[in-house]
Amino acid sequence: MYQRDLPPVEPIEPGLVSPLDHAVALRDLETMTMVRRAVERRDVVLAFQPIVQSPRLDRPAFYEGLIRLLDETGRIIPARDFIETIETTELGRKIDCLSLEMGLIALAEDPGIRLAINMSARSIGYPNWMKTLNRGLAIDDTAAERLILEITESSAMVMPDLVSVFMQDLQQRGVSFALDDFGAGFTSFRYLREFFFDIIKIDGQFIRGIADNADNQVLTQALMSIARHFDMFTIAESVESARDATFLQSIGIDCMQGYYFGAPTILPPWKAPVAEMRA
């Protein structure tokens, strides 16, 4: 999640648009235009980041496929630069379709990997998303059990009842689900009990610098306890140092993800030579 921290706006005369509002609107318009053009050109790629097992830090449990756009100059644009602007629009649904399509292609090409793909809960009712999923699962009958769908905590709370039914249907077909950004502040624990996520990804705000932060140590262990109570696998996001990784191992986190173990790379790590492309 990426929220804007905006300064207070001075009162203005009715009917006038403040310079700040105008600047934000202009920026969002430019972002929408950039994304729309990239989608029309299909200038999108996945960047893959490993999720490692805590007992074996040299062995990825699976990878996360992170959407990237290419602008007209070929520059790689990470999701944080556009996803908030398009999240509630049809462009957001098209991005989810492209992410899923590319993820399913990667699974079909490499039957030995597991892959997590991000989606918004808003895409559940988008017909093309489900068509993309059904087409990919029909091509490869092992894909479902190797596919993990990551739903952010914030979008899951928009329509919790629909998400719960959707998850149960796909879990019966073998698909797993991860709750992304757990602890970021939106989850009703009543719904957490009903969701039955397979994986909980603890938000990076609790993980960065955890080895030296007693408050985050307590909070992370509390979130881990909740996950274990509901029989959910735990992943620490944003692990960026050896000290943090060692501490997380000591408290029994199941898996870890972050730049300490590898940055997202456009060239799939399981295919990559020594020199990799970073994104």
Image (spheres, rainbow, N blue to C red):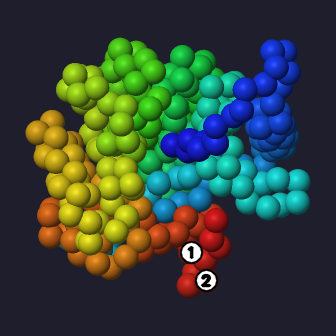
Number of disc labels? 2
* Residue 64 placement (x, y as % from top left): 47, 54
x then y, percent, for residue 77: 71, 55
Q: Is residue 235 visible?
A: yes
> What numbered label is drawn on residue 275?
2
Secondary structure under the numbered disc 1 in the rendered image:
loop
Q: Amino acid at mark 2?
A: Ala
What crowding class fits label 1: few (fewer than 14 Cα within 10 Å), some (14-19), or many (20 or more)?
few
Answer yes or no: is residue 62 visible: no
Q: Residue furthest bottom?
A: 274
Residue at the extreme right of the image, as rendered? 72
Q: Which residue is mark 1?
A: 272
Looking at the image, which is closer to me, 89 or 54?
A: 89
Q: Residue at horizontal 49%, vertical 58%? A: 110
- Residue 7's quadrant in the figure? top right
For the residues marked 2 and 1, what is the alpha-carbon distance in whole angstroms? 7 Å
Residue 126, percent from left and from top: 59, 20
At x 61%, y 83%, the residue is: 275
Front in this rendered view, residue 215 or 265? 215
Binning the other alpha carbons within 10 Å of mark 2 as few (below 14), some (14 to 19) or many (20 upward) gives few
